Image (cartoon, coloured by chain):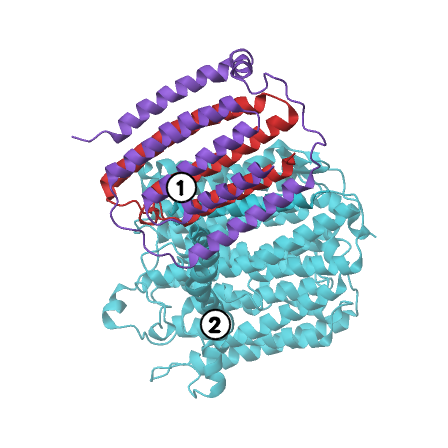
C-alpha cells in the first residue's frame, strides 16, 4: 500500500511546478494552464486524504473545486481575449499600466 | 504500488513539459496528458466518480476551451528567451517544493488505510453527500457557473 | 521691627479720583470730534480739576496716621491668592495724589493754550486724561499688581504722547525707544513681583496687598529679598530714567511740551521713587540693594549734569536735569531717607513743571525754535515767562528759601550723615549741585538775556503767551518757593514733612540727629558752590557779548564727549541693538526658512522619499506579485516547520 506521504509529496511537486510556470512563462495562456495544474495538485491531495481518512467530504470538495476552476478558466480566458484585442500581445511583462 | 510510481513519474514529466515547452499547443497537450494521469490516480484512490468527472469536465471541456482560445488568438511569435528571472523563479519554487515535502513528511501516515466499503467513491455516495449536506454550495455553484458564462460573454464580446 | 499698619477706614469717595478722568477720556474718545476742540479740552480740564478737588478733600479728612480704603471688586481669586481692585490713601499716597492731580490740572489748563492750533487737540486730551487715570491707579492701588497695571498704563500713554505728532517719523522712533527701554525695565519688575509672590507662597502666604506684605515680609531670606529688590529696582531704573536705562528720556522731548512737563518731569518718572517708598519695608531688609541704589543715583545725578552743561536744545537741558534730579531722589532712597526722597519729588514737581511750561512758552513765542543759540533777549518780550522762569531756576539751583533749597539740602545732609550714607556720596551730590546751578543759569542767560540772536522775521513775532498759559506758570512759581517750606530743617522752623510721612515710611527712614553745626556747615558749603556756579554762568553767558556764543568755546575733547552725551546711544547701538538686529535678521532669513521650515518640509520630504523606496515594489508586473506571494508563503511554511 502506498503511504499517504508519497501522494502528498507528489502533489507538492506538481504544485511547485505549477508555481514555476506561473512565475516564469511570458505567455498568459500558459500561465493560466499552470494555474490549472496547481489546482489539480490540490485536488489530488484532497482525494488522497479522503481515501485515507474514509470521508466523502474530500471528494465533495474536489467536485466543487472543479466547478469553480471551470468558471475561473472561462472568465480568465475571456479576459485574455479582451486584453489581446487591445494590446496584440500575450506577454504579462508588457501589461504594466499599474506600475507606479 | 507500481502503478502509482509509474503514474507519478509520468505525471511529473508531463507537468514539466507543460511549463517548459515553447510552443503553446504542446503545452496544452501536455496538460491534457497530465489531467488524464491524475484522473487515473483518482480511480486508484477509490474515487471513480470524481475521476470520470475529471476527464469529462477538465480534460474534456476546459482543455477544449483552452485550445479554442489558442487557435482564436493564434499567437505566432514564440516567446523570447528569458534571463535571470527564470532561474530565480525556479529556485524559489524548488524551495517551495522542498518546504512542502518537509512539511508533509512530518506527520505519521495512518497505519492502515481506511477499509473501503463497496460504495465508497461511488456516485451514490457522492450524490448523497452533495444533495443533503452540501446542497447550498451546490446551488450556489450553479449560480456561479451562470455568472461565469455571462461574464465571459460580456468580456469577450467584440466592441462595435 | 515692622509696625502694623493702622486699620483702614472705608471711604467710597476714593474711587472718583481716578474714575473722573477716565470718564472724561472715554467721552472725549467717542464724542470728542462732535464736541469740538474747545469743549473737549474744557471737559478734560474739568475732570482733572474735580479729581483734584476730591483729592484735596480726602487729604483734609485724612488723620495723621490714618488710611482710607475703597474696594471696588475682586479682580481674581485663585485658591488663597486674591487680588482686589481696591484703592487706598495714606499719607504717602495723599502727597502723590495732590501732585498728580494738582500739577496735572495746571498742565491741562496750560495745554488749552499750547495745543490750541493743533489739529489733534482732542486726541491729546484723551491721552492726557488716560495718563492721569493710570498714574492715579499706580499711586492709589493697594496691591502690587494694581500698581503694576498703572505702571504699564503710564508707559503706554507716554508712548502715545511722545509720538503724538506721528507724521514725523523721528517722533515715532522716539516713542518706540521710550516704550522698549521701559519694557526692559518692566521685565525685571515682573520678575521681581513673581519672585515675591512665589517665595511668600512657599511659606504659605499668598498675597500682593501692601498691608499684608508688610506683615509677612520678614519671613523671606535675605538673599531672596535682595534678589526681589534688585529686580524691582531694574524696573525703577527704566521708568525713572537712571543708569543704564535713562536713554529714552532725552529723546522723549520729541513730544509736546506739556507732555514733557507732566509725564517726564512731575509724575511718571517719579513712579520709581514712589514704588521704592511704598515698598520701603522690603528695601529696608536689603542693604546691598540700597547701597547699589544710592550708588546709581549719585552716579546718574553727576553724569547727567555733566551732559547738561553743553546741550543746546532748551528741552534737552531740562531733560538731563530731570535725570539728574531723579538721581538725587534715588540717592536719598539708597541711604534710607525715603521721606527726603518724596520731599524732593514734591518740590521738583513744582519747579520742573514750571521750567518745562516756561520753555514751552518760549518755544511758542519763537515759532517752534528750540535751539538756545538762536534765542536771547526774550526778557523784554515775555516778562511773565521770564520772571517765573527765574524763580524756578533759583529753586532748582537751590537758592536760599526756595523749595529746592530745602529739599536738596535735606538730601545732601542725609547723604552725609545717614547710617548708610558717606562723605563720598555727599561730595558727588555737592559737585552736582554746583553743576546744576551752572547749567540752569547758563540756560536762563542764553535764552532771556543779551541781544536776540533770532533771525529778524522771528524777532518780530516775539510775544508773551496768553493768560491761559502764563497763569499756571505763576501758580507753579509760587509753589516753587513755598512748597519747600514744609520740610525745613530743625534749626529753622522744623519739618512738618517728617511727621507727616513718618508713619508710612517708618522702618526705612533713619532720623539722624547729628550735630547741628555739621548740618549748617554743609549747608553753607552748598551755598558756596551754588553761588560759584551762578557766577561762572554769568561770566560766560550773562554779560552782553558782541559775538555769537557757541557754548564752551574751546571745543575740547571733554566738551565733545559731553555734547554727544558720552556717546551712550551709540555704544548701546553697537553693543546691543546691532547684534540683536543681526541675530533677528539671521533668524528670519536663515534659521526660520532653513531649520524650521526645513523640519516641517523635511517631514514631508522624508515621507515622500521613504515611500518612493517602497513604491518600487509596484512594478505592475503580475508575475512579480506572484513571486512576492510565494516568498510570503515560504516564510510561513518555514515558520510552521520550526514549530515542534
The letter of the cyan chain is C
Circle 1 sits on which residue?
B30
Of badges 1 and 2, nearer the viewer stands 1
Viewer-proximal residue among B132 and C254: B132
Q: Is residue C474 visible?
A: no
**Pointer 2 chain:** C
Q: Residue at x 48, y 23 (%)?
A: A64
Q: Is residue C184 above or below residue A10?
A: below
Q: Nearer the viewer, residue C448 or B34?
A: B34
Chain B as rendered: colour = purple
Give percent across and percent down for residue C625. Answer: 44, 45
For the C terminus of chain C, the quadrant is top right
Examine the image and state in which quarter residue B56 appears: top left
Question: Which residue is drawn at the image coordinates 56% and 15% (left, top)?
Answer: B125
Percent x, y for residue B66?
A: 33, 35
Q: Quick one: label 1, few (<14), some, or many (20+) residues within 10 Å?
A: many
Of C419 and C643, the residue lying toward us: C643
Spatial separation of the CA atoms under disc 1 and disc 2: 101 Å
Residue A15 coordinates in the image, percent (x, y): 51, 41
**Picture quarter containing residue C451?**
bottom left
Disc 2 packing (10 Å; few <14; some 14–19; many ≥20): some
For disc 2, the marked residue is: C569
Q: Is residue C437 above or below residue C91?
A: below
Give the secondary structure at mark 1: helix
Q: Quadrant of residue C345?
A: bottom right
Amino acid at each position: 500500500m502506498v503511504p499517504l506521504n508519497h501522494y502528498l509529496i507528489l502533489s507538492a511537486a506538481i504544485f511547485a511546478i505549477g508555481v514555476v510556470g506561473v512565475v516564469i512563462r511570458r505567455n498568459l495562456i500558459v500561465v493560466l494552464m499552470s494555474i490549472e495544474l496547481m489546482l489539480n495538485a490540490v485536488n489530488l491531495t484532497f482525494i488522497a486524504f479522503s481515501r485515507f481518512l474514509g470521508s466523502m467530504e474530500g471528494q465533495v470538495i474536489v467536485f466543487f473545486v472543479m466547478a469553480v476552476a471551470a468558471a475561473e478558466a472561462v472568465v480568465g480566458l475571456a479576459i485574455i481575449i479582451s486584453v489581446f484585442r487591445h494590446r496584440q500581445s500575450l506577454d504579462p511583462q508588457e501589461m504594466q499600466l499599474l506600475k507606479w | 504500488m507500481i502503478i502509482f510510481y509509474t503514474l507519478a513519474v509520468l505525471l511529473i514529466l508531463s507537468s514539466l513539459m507543460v511549463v517548459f515547452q515553447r510552443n503553446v499547443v504542446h503545452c496544452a497537450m501536455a496538460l491534457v496528458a497530465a489531467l488524464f494521469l491524475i484522473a487515473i490516480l483518482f480511480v486508484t484512490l477509490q474515487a471513480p466518480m470524481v475521476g470520470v468527472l475529471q476527464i469529462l469536465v477538465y480534460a474534456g471541456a476546459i482543455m477544449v476551451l483552452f485550445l479554442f482560445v489558442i487557435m482564436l488568438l493564434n499567437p505566432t511569435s514564440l516567446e523570447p528567451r528569458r534571463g535571470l528571472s527564470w532561474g530565480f523563479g525556479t529556485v524559489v519554487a524548488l524551495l517551495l517544493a522542498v518546504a512542502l515535502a518537509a512539511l508533509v513528511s512530518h506527520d505519521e501516515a495512518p497505519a492502515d488505510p481506511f477499509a473501503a466499503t463497496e460504495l465508497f467513491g461511488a456516485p451514490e455516495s457522492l450524490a448523497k453527500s452533495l444533495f443533503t449536506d452540501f446542497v447550498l454550495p451546490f446551488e450556489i455553484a450553479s449560480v456561479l457557473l451562470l455568472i461565469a458564462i455571462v461574464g465571459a460573454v460580456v468580456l469577450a464580446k467584440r466592441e462595435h | 521691627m515692622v509696625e502694623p499698619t493702622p486699620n483702614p477706614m472705608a471711604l467710597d469717595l476714593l474711587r472718583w479720583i481716578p474714575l473722573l478722568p477716565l470718564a472724561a477720556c472715554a467721552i472725549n474718545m467717542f464724542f470728542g470730534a462732535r464736541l469740538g476742540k474747545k469743549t473737549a479740552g474744557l471737559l478734560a480740564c474739568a475732570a482733572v480739576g474735580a479729581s483734584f478737588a476730591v483729592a484735596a478733600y480726602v487729604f483734609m479728612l485724612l488723620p495723621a496716621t490714618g488710611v482710607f480704603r475703597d474696594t471696588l471688586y475682586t479682580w481674581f481669586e485663585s485658591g488663597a491668592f486674591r487680588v482686589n481692585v481696591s484703592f487706598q490713601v495714606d499719607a504717602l499716597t495723599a502727597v502723590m495724589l495732590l501732585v498728580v492731580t494738582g500739577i496735572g490740572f495746571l498742565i491741562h489748563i496750560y495745554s488749552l493754550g499750547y495745543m490750541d492750533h493743533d489739529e489733534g487737540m482732542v486726541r491729546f486730551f484723551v491721552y492726557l486724561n488716560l495718563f492721569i487715570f493710570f498714574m492715579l491707579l499706580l499711586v492709589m492701588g493697594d496691591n502690587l499688581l494694581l500698581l503694576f497695571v498703572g505702571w504699564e498704563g503710564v508707559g503706554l500713554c507716554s508712548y502715545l504722547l511722545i509720538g503724538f505728532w506721528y507724521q514725523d517719523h523721528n517722533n515715532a522712533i522716539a516713542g518706540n525707544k521710550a516704550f522698549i527701554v521701559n519694557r526692559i525695565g518692566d521685565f525685571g519688575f515682573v520678575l521681581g513681583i513673581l519672585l515675591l509672590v512665589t517665595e511668600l507662597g512657599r511659606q504659605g502666604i499668598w498675597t500682593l496687598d501692601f498691608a499684608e506684605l508688610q506683615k509677612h515680609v520678614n519671613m523671606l531670606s535675605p538673599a531672596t529679598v535682595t534678589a526681589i529688590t534688585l529686580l524691582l529696582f531694574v524696573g525703577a531704573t527704566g521708568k525713572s530714567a537712571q543708569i543704564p536705562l535713562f536713554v529714552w528720556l532725552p529723546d522723549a522731548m520729541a513730544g509736546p511740551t506739556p507732555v514733557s512737563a507732566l509725564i517726564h518731569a512731575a509724575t511718571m518718572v517719579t513712579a520709581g521713587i514712589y514704588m521704592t517708598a511704598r515698598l520701603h519695608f522690603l528695601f529696608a531688609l536689603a542693604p546691598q540693594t540700597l547701597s547699589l541704589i544710592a550708588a546709581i543715583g549719585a552716579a546718574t545725578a553727576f553724569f547727567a549734569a555733566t551732559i547738561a552743561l553743553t546741550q543746546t536744545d532748551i528741552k534737552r537741558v531740562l531733560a538731563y536735569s530731570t535725570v539728574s534730579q531723579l538721581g538725587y531722589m534715588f540717592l536719598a532712597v539708597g541711604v534710607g531717607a525715603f521721606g527726603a526722597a518724596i520731599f524732593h519729588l514734591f518740590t521738583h514737581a513744582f519747579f520742573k513743571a514750571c521750567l518745562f511750561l516756561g520753555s514751552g512758552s518760549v518755544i511758542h513765542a519763537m515759532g517752534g525754535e528750540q535751539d538756545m543759540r538762536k534765542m536771547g533777549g526774550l526778557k523784554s518780550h515775555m516778562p511773565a515767562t521770564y520772571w517765573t522762569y527765574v524763580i524756578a531756576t533759583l529753586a532748582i539751583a537751590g537758592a536760599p528759601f526756595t523749595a529746592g533749597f530745602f529739599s536738596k539740602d535735606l538730601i545732601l545732609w542725609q547723604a552725609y550723615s545717614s547710617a548708610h550714607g558717606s562723605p563720598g556720596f555727599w561730595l558727588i551730590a555737592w559737585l552736582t549741585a554746583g553743576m546744576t546751578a551752572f547749567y540752569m543759569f547758563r540756560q536762563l542767560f542764553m535764552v532771556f538775556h543779551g541781544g536776540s540772536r533770532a533771525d529778524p522775521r522771528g524777532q518780530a513775532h516775539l510775544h508773551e503767551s496768553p493768560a491761559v498759559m502764563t497763569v499756571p506758570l505763576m501758580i507753579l512759581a509760587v509753589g516753587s518757593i513755598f512748597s519747600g517750606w514744609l520740610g525745613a530743617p530743625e534749626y529753622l522752623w522744623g519739618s512738618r514733612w517728617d511727621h507727616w510721612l513718618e508713619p508710612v515710611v517708618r522702618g526705612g527712614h533713619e532720623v539722624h540727629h547729628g550735630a547741628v553745626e555739621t548740618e549748617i556747615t554743609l549747608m553753607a558749603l552748598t551755598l558756596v558752590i551754588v553761588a560759584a556756579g551762578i557766577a561762572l554762568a554769568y561770566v560766560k553767558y550773562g554779560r552782553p557779548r558782541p559775538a555769537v556764543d557757541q557754548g564752551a568755546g574751546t571745543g575740547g575733547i571733554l566738551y565733545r564727549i559731553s555734547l554727544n552725551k558720552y556717546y551712550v546711544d551709540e555704544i548701546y547701538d553697537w553693543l546691543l541693538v546691532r547684534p540683536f538686529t543681526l541675530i533677528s535678521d539671521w533668524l528670519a532669513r536663515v534659521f526660520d526658512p532653513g531649520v524650521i521650515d526645513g523640519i516641517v518640509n523635511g517631514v514631508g520630504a522624508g515621507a515622500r522619499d521613504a515611500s518612493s523606496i517602497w513604491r518600487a515594489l509596484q512594478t505592475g508586473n503580475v508575475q512579480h506579485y506572484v513571486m512576492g506571494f510565494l516568498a510570503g508563503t515560504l516564510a510561513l511554511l518555514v515558520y510552521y516547520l520550526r514549530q515542534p
